[in-house]
Each structure stands twice: as C-alpha cells, then as structure tokens.
Image (spheres, grey):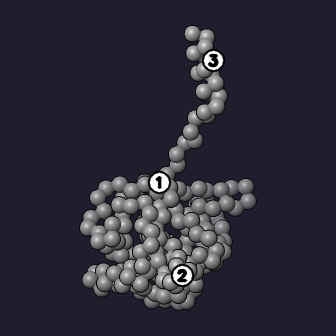
Amino acid sequence: MPRLAATLILVLALCPPAPAAIASTLRALSLELLVAGSDAVVIGVAGAAATRHLPGGAIVRDVPFRVEQWVVGHGPEEIVVRLLGGEEGDRGLLVPGEVELEPGETALFFLEAGVGGFAVAGMAQGHFRVVTDGRTGVRYAERTLGELNLVGEPGPDSLGLARDRTCAFLPLDALAARIRELAAGR
C-alpha cells in the first residue's frame, strides 16, 4: 500500500491538472446566414489597433482597415473595424472567440455597421484570413474559429463553413463570387 501511495503522489506531482478551458459559444452561422446578417463584406489589410475604454467600461480595439475590395456594399478606402477586448494600462479584457488580427494581415470580413465603425458579424465566424500560394499566386481564404464554440444547426451551406473549425484554402475569388450571388438574392 505505501508503494501505491508513493506512485500516486509521484503521478500527481508530474501531471498537474489541465488549465481551465476558455471559450465563447455562439449559434453556428452558415455562409448564407453570414451574408444575410451583414451590412458589408470587404477584403483588405489591417493596420495597428488602437485600444481604448468605452464609456461603460468595456475595452475595445479599433483597427484601421484599408479596403482592397468591397465584395458587398460600398464605402471609403479606409474603415474602422471594432473588436472586443484588449489591454490598456493595467486593465485588460479577454473575449474568447473574438477575431485575432495582426497588423498587415489581409482578411475578408463580414461586417455589421455600428457606432464608431464596423463590428465583425458572428465574431470569428465572420473573419477569413487571406493567404497567397507562393508557387501559384492564387489567393485563398481560411477561417479559424480559435476559442469559439458553435452550437445548433447552421442551415444549408454549400461550403460547410459552420461545421468545420477551420476551412482552409477556399479560393478567394470563388468565395467572393458566391457571397455576391447570395447578397443579390436577399
């Protein structure tokens, strides 16, 4: 019995408990639902975020976004995309499932108009990184949900976007064409 207790103590010492999982949970949105719920869809390049406090105390990041193409809608060449969370001074706010965006990153966004700029529709569901195949020069869209859990039936979706955590390498031109087609039918 003492040997069993010693083994158990050794196992517990070498295997600390796993950290708590942090995630947000949202209703799964198909491509059709993302288009229907968006005021605009754009492709462009992110600038450096400016973090600030809103009057109610929430912390947000305002990201300048240089628009290369208005896939749906129209507007200026530069817009502001507001993301929840960030760090300012000794305060911070983590919003699991919110878009993680690096300065200089090219992305496709499904956007909802709001005060002070645009918000991303469906949190990380409405953000696609744009990557270029170095060999062919073809641009692809990739959606990564990060710490966003999806629930419910997303409805019909020819691309299967809401069912997969990552939909890598969707040809950007084909995705943009499908988005325009869906927007024309709403």
Give the residue drawn at x 42%, y 79%.
Answer: 171
Q: Is residue 77 above or below residue 149?
A: below
Mark sitting on residue 135: 2
Looking at the rendered image, the disc whose residue lies closer to the viewer, 2 or 3, is: 2
Residue projecting furthest to the top: 1
State which tag comes first along the sequence, 3 or 1: 3
Left or right: residue 112 versus residue 68 is: left
Give the residue drawn at x 39%, y 61%.
Answer: 164
Give the residue drawn at x 66%, y 71%.
Answer: 50
Residue projecting furthest to the front: 135
Q: CA distance from mark 2 to mark 3?
A: 57 Å
State which tag comes first along the sequence, 2 or 3: 3
| Residue identified by numbered label 1 | 24
Mark sitting on residue 6: 3
Is residue 121 among what the camera can see?
A: yes
Secondary structure state at the residue bearing disc 2: loop
Secondary structure state at the residue bearing disc 1: strand
Looking at the rendered image, the disc whose residue lies closer to the viewer, 3 or 1, is: 3
The crowd level at tag 3 (other Cα within 10 Å; few <14, some 14-19, many 20+) is: few
Give the image location of residue 109, x and y in percent: 47, 76
